[in-house]
Image: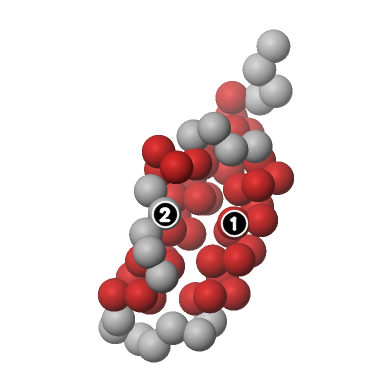
Amino acid sequence: MRLIVASELDNLPETALHSKFYRVQQELAFTEPATTERANALASLENINRAIITRRIKGPGF
């Protein structure tokens, strides 16, 4: 799995972020410990989670 970086997530709606988070979680389940693939999945989940939290903090944006 490739790393999903924060800049890719900037313009996505929260629903799309949740969808990506779920998909990466599913992919993570099939990775082997101590592999680059697993590290990328974990880092991607962290980036997606941060983007979701940022959207919630900002609110609906009037």
Q: Is residue 53 visible?
A: no
Identify the secondary structure beneath mark 2.
loop
Residue matched to label 1: 20
Q: Is residue 26 visible?
A: yes
Front residue of 2/35: it is: 2
The image shows residue 4, relative to residue 41, as above or below, that is above
Q: Position of residue 56 (x, y in %)?
A: 63, 34
Identify which residue is drawn at 54% across, 32% down: 11
Q: Position of residue 61 (x, y in %)?
A: 66, 17
Identify which residue is drawn at 58% across, 58% down: 21
Residue 59 horizontal side relative to residue 11, left or right: right
Residue matched to label 2: 4
Between the residue at mark 1 and the residue at mark 2, the CA separation in whole angstroms equals 10 Å
Q: Position of residue 28 (x, y in %)?
A: 49, 76
Q: How many marks?
A: 2
Mark 1 or mark 2, earlier in chain? 2
Mark 2, residues whose alpha carbon is within 10 Å: few (<14), some, or many (≥20)?
some
